[in-house]
Image (spheres, rainbow, N blue to C red):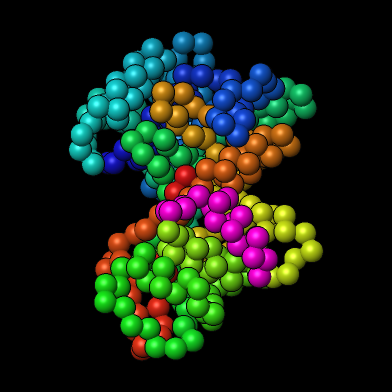
Amino acid sequence: MNRGEWSEAYALLALIGNANFILSDKSLADQNTSQYKVHSILIPTDAPNKFVSLAVQNDSVIANYDGQNNSIPIGDVKGIATSLFQQIQTSTSTTFSFNQLDSLWNDFFNPQIKATRSEKSDIKLEIYDSASQTKAIKGFSIKSNLGGATSLLNASQSTNFLYEAPSKISIADPTPKNLGRLVKSLPLKHLGSVNQTYKQNLQRVDQNLEILISRLLVEYYGASNREKYIKDLLAIVANKNPFNFTNTSDYQKIISKFLTATAFGMVPRDLWNGSLSANGGMIVVKADGKLASFYLDDTQSNTNLNDYLFEHSFFDTASTTRHDFGKVFDDKFFKFNLLIRL
């Protein structure tokens, strides 16, 4: 697997070794709270709607699946977690193997760690809230800062946005950046998402979102000084105020709703009903191997998560040949691609 996929396995092992669910602020620093604990971890299997349950009892991890139980010393789990983290840090290959995990994974009844295309939840945690003395099973998305930025929204042809120029475009070297600089000052017609399903999803979040993203992409691809962070590009658009909002802070509200929907529920090619499959929040594997956690059910943590997403999300440029964008067709039409990293 690649670093990101191995990071998800590492996050699982690290969660097993630390029952306290310590929440983080927007800079991923720990907050002083001991209100929440991880009671158990639920990981999907190949069988539909069946999960492996992992829970710590004394000095052992108890894996339960379909009435079967395995007991694994927690020291073994922590040792493998440490070795995996070192392997992720030191590997020079894009993908690599880690055979030390094979035996442990077999004891865990071989669950799946990777979410499906339409599922934003990588694992489910049974969280105990000591304040209310209640338990809740919630889905969490796992992101990793090991080995570079992680994707919040993967690029595909479904994340292309279509534009029409007011007249014929002539460009000798049609790269996305060159094209962006050429068309940035033109009165473009923003035709929105090329994918009708994604178009409906974006409109469900906010009626202005589709065109707002279109404008942000023009600012990104046309940037002379390589602005890429969404907060910086949004400041440029908000200053122009294309929607004539009375309060320009409404632009941030729209984008924050979009980032939350993208992180926890909405995917481009599936019609979205507004629900969040990762309804618990996000776990981030930091560069030092520690985990930063955000819990949507906690009001302050929810605010911190929104701030984290807004301040750290940025646009990136995907493969133009694979995703078919960044060139002119029919004289005055072109597409820009939406790829968001964190």
Relative vertical location of residue 259 with respect to residue 171 in this rendering, above or below? above
Q: Main secondary structure of the magenta part?
A: helix
Nearest the viewer among 40 and 5 is: 5
Relative vertical location of residue 7 with respect to residue 38 in this rendering, above or below? below
Based on the picture, tell me whether residue 239 belongs to the magenta stretch. yes
Relative vertical location of residue 21 with respect to residue 189 in this rendering, above or below? above
User: Could you tell me which quadrant the N terminus lies in?
Assistant: top left
Q: Is residue 205 left or right of residue 155?
A: right
Task: Please report the residue visible at 64 percent of the width from the left and 52 percent of the height from the top.
Answer: 256
Q: Position of residue 267 (x, y in %)?
A: 50, 60
Task: Please report the residue visible at 47 percent of the width from the left and 19 percent of the height from the top.
Answer: 17
Q: Position of residue 298 (x, y in %)?
A: 71, 35
Q: Position of residue 97 (x, y in %)?
A: 21, 34
Q: Quadrant of residue 5?
A: top left
Q: Position of residue 154 (x, y in %)?
A: 41, 56
- Whether residue 162 appears in this view of the structure is yes
Nearest the viewer among 287 and 112 is: 287
Q: Quadrant of residue 234?
A: bottom right
Nearest the viewer among 247 and 139 is: 247
Relative vertical location of residue 183 with respect to residue 240 in this rendering, above or below? below
Magenta stretch: give its range. Answer: 225-242
Task: Please report the residue visible at 55 percent of the width from the left and 39 percent of the height from the top.
Answer: 282
- Whether residue 138 appears in this view of the structure is no
Task: Please report the residue visible at 49 percent of the width from the left and 27 percent of the height from the top.
Answer: 291
- The number of discs equals 0
